Image (cartoon, rainbow, N blue to C red):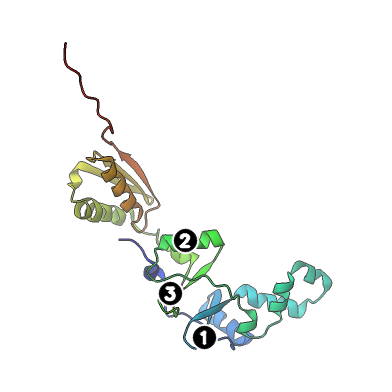
């Protein structure tokens, strides 16, 4: 039901070693039409990341070394841009995710940290895949009919053992609207939470008619 990083990651990953040269990395990026290269050690553990921007910085420094340019580029970036192999050019603080992490978790990391991509590593820290922003967004490219069928069949019918004829589920552009009369508020809210986790769901509108928390008890007729 829930989309995980494993469902959307690209594998195998085009990666390089710390000794890979500038020209080799530029050729790989062009050949595979990718925007970055994870740098791995002998055990396939991620030790850095070289992006197109890192390679462009090297070219810029090589052809434009003057005070005006140096004032624009930060000293740390200027120093890194003078490198000729991956270990000199790579960013060493690399954020990774697990294949079993929820896509929602990966999306939050990308948004909060302004990341364009996330290497995927296994329990031993070895590189097993990579995801990009477009991979995460692809989760939402799912027909409304499929989303509705999963909510009705898997959540309403099988998970909560309810009669789907007593509930309404409508999906438009990934937005789910749920209605009906759940026996308790807790039941309805649990259904909504599960629906939010379905792959392709953008949002869930809760239109359940909940029972009164404190029903009015009629007094004796005088």
**First of labels 3, 1 by sequence position:** 3
Observer-side mark, 3 or 2, equals: 2
- Mark 3 vs mark 1, CA separation in Å: 20 Å
Q: Which residue is mark 1?
A: 41
- Nearer mark to the viewer, of 3 and 1: 1
Q: Residues within 10 Å of mark 2 (few under 14, many from 20)?
A: many
* Along the viewing direction, whichever of 123 and 59 lies nearer the viewer: 123
Q: Is residue 10 left or right of residue 217?
A: right
Q: Sequence order check: which comes first, mark 2 or mark 1?
A: 1
User: Which numbered disc flags the more N-terminal residue, 3 or 2?
Assistant: 3
- Of the pair 84 and 184, the residue shown nearer to us: 184
Left/right placement of residue 102 relative to residue 31 reads left
In the image, residue 40 lies at what x, y percent? 52, 83
* Residue at x 48% of width, y 65% of height: 134
Q: Tag 1: Cα neighbours inside 10 Å, few (<14), some, or many (≥20)?
A: some
Question: For the residues marked 2 and 1, what is the alpha-carbon distance in whole angstroms?
Answer: 27 Å
Q: Is residue 28 left or right of residue 174?
A: right
Badge 2 marks a residue whose secondary structure is: helix
Q: Position of residue 171 (x, y in %)?
A: 33, 48
Which residue does the numbered mark 2 point to in the structure image?
Answer: 107
- The answer to which image quadrant residue 29 occupies is bottom right
Look at the numbered disc 1 and give the secondary structure of its residue: loop
Q: Alpha carbon of mark 3 to alpha carbon of mark 2: how far?
A: 16 Å
In this picture, is 160 found above or below 118? Answer: above
* Location of the C terminus (image quadrant): top left
**Residue under label 3:** 10
Q: Is residue 184 left or right of residue 78?
A: left
The residue furthest right is 67
Q: Classify mark 3: residues with Cα within 10 Å, few (<14), some (14-19) or many (20+).
A: some
Q: Position of residue 192 (x, y in %)?
A: 32, 48
Outermost residue on the top side: it is: 222
């Amino acid at each position: 039901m829930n989309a995980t990083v494993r469902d959307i990651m690209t594998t195998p990953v085009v990666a390089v070693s710390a000794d890979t040269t500038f020209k080799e990395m530029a050729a790989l990026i062009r050949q595979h039409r990718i925007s970055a290269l994870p740098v791995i050690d002998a055990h396939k553990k991620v030790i850095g990341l070289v992006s197109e921007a890192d390679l462009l910085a090297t070219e810029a420094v090589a052809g434009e070394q003057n005070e005006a340019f140096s004032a624009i580029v930060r000293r740390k970036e200027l120093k890194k841009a003078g490198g000729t192999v991956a270990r000199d050019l790579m960013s060493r603080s690399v954020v990774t995710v697990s294949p079993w992490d929820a896509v929602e978790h990966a999306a939050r990391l990308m948004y909060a940290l302004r990341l364009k991509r996330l290497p995927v590593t296994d329990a031993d820290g070895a590189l097993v895949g990579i995801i990009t922003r477009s991979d995460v967004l692809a989760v939402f490219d799912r027909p409304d009919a499929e989303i509705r069928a999963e909510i009705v069949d898997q959540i309403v019918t099988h998970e909560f053992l309810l009669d789907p004829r007593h509930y309404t589920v409508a999906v438009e552009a990934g937005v789910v609207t749920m209605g009906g009369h759940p026996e308790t508020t807790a039941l309805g809210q649990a259904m909504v939470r599960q629906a939010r986790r379905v792959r392709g769901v953008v949002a869930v509108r809760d239109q359940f008619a909940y029972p009164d928390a404190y029903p009015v008890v009629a007094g004796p007729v005088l």
